[in-house]
Image (cartoon, rainbow, N blue to C red):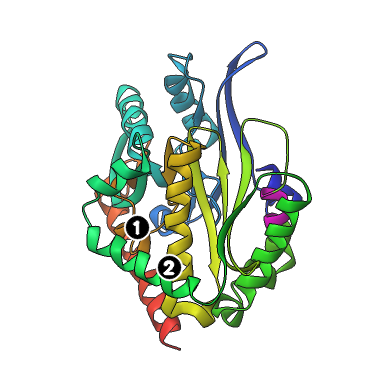
């Protein structure tokens, strides 16, 4: 949130729902009201979300046993009588939140769900390879890596602090802009706001969440770069760019495979989260899945239109956005 604010990507409509006792903070949820088909043109509440937010569950202290019930009471106070539309809610957070909504008499249901690739670290990289269900895909990646290495010295370089991290972020912005995202105007470097976000989000700062940049280099020149945030337990791989002139050699996927190797060898995280939407190429590399839901929730008394009607409207809006993306993609 601080990075979004520093980049100028947080508007004045942002609010924060906090649950606590005295000076102790037990739960936190940034949210805002916006127009949405689910509200038939009226405001609908939802957690703060941007293209760079990969999960929207509330932050809840582990030791705060009643915090979710208090948070649900707060939802009704923060947006009286309003529906909530909640995207990207991981199963581990959707289930306890759903139970708290049930206890408070809310009605809720899923608009959609998808399986995001994740990888839980094994005891060793050899164990990961031995258990992998798509050995043919791994063999193909090794073949492509050998072809790429035939053009020079191939190496993985990791930066987590100082000038090395800043330089890796700048190299990422340059590499991404040279590709199709730059041509489409969607690369982070194409807008001052998103360029500032990259520099703020992946900066060396104190705290439990640290930035990490993994660079696959060929004779010292980056051919693929991954930017991630990690808390030591989960590393969320937020952004990846690669040299599209070498697309046939799959440098981006080779880098992802090298990150898997580094995760096992250095144990920098217990889990790798692909942060991906449906259709990711990492579905072949990461064997586990985390289900993410989009839900609509109604407080007691908010029955017109019904929950079922609102869910249908939300699905129609999803299908319309997907169709628009397909048309724009063909252009």
In the current view of this chain or complex, which residue is farthest to the top? 22
* Classed neighbour count for the residue bearing mark 1: other residues with Cα under 10 Å, few (<14), some (14–19), many (≥20): many
What is the span of residues highlighted in magenta in the rendered image?
A: 197-202
Q: Residue at x 48, y 51 (%)?
A: 259
- Residue found at the far left of this picture: 133
Check disc 2 and report the residue beneath it: 145
Residue 186 position in % (x across, y down): 59, 72
Percent position (x, y) of residue 282?
A: 36, 59
Q: Which image quadrant for residue 144? A: bottom left
**In the image, is 170 to the left or to the right of 134?**
right
**Vertical comparison of 157 with 192: above or below:** above
Q: Which mark is residue 314?
A: 1
| Marks 1 and 2, the one that precedes in the sequence | 2
Residue drawn at (68%, 71%), measured in percent from left and top? 174
Up/down of 88 relative to 317, above or below: above
Instruction: Tell me the residue at 68%/58% (across/down).
Output: 168
Does the magenta segment cover residue 330? no
In the displayed structure, does residue 101 sit left or right of residue 266? left
Could you tell me which quadrant the N terminus lies in?
Answer: top right
Does the image show residue 52? yes
Label 2: state its secondary structure.
Answer: helix
C-alpha span from label 1 to label 2: 43 Å
């Amino acid at each position: 949130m601080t990075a979004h604010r520093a980049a100028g990507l947080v508007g004045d409509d942002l609010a924060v729902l906090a649950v606590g006792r005295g000076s102790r903070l037990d739960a936190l949820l940034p949210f805002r009201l916006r127009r949405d088909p689910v509200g038939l043109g009226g405001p609908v509440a939802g957690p703060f979300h941007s293209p760079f937010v990969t999960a929207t569950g509330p932050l809840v202290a582990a030791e705060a046993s009643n915090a979710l019930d208090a948070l649900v009471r707060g939802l009704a106070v923060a947006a009286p009588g309003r529906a909530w539309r909640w995207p990207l809610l991981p199963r581990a957070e959707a289930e306890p939140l759903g139970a708290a909504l049930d206890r408070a008499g809310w009605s809720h249901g899923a608009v959609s769900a998808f399986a995001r690739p994740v990888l839980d670290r094994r005891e060793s990289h050899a164990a990961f390879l031995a258990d992998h269900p798509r050995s043919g895909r791994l063999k193909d990646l090794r073949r492509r890596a050998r072809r790429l290495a035939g053009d020079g010295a191939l190496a993985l370089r990791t930066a987590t602090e100082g000038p090395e991290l800043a330089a890796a972020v700048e190299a990422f912005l340059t590499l991404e802009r040279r590709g199709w995202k730059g041509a489409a105007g969607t690369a982070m470097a194409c807008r001052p706001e998103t360029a500032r976000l990259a520099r703020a989000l992946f900066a060396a700062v104190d705290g439990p969440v640290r930035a990490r940049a993994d660079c696959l280099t060929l004779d010292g020149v980056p051919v693929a770069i991954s930017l991630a945030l990690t808390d030591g337990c989960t590393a969320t791989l937020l952004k990846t760019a690669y040299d599209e002139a070498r697309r046939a050699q799959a440098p981006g996927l080779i880098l992802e495979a090298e990150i898997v190797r580094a995760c096992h060898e250095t144990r920098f995280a217990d889990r790798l989260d692909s942060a991906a939407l449906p259709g990711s190429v990492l579905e072949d590399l990461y064997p586990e899945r985390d289900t993410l839901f989009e839900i609509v929730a109604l407080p007691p008394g908010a029955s017109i239109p019904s929950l079922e009607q609102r869910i249908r409207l939300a699905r129609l809006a999803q299908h319309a956005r997907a169709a628009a993306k397909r048309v724009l993609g063909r252009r």
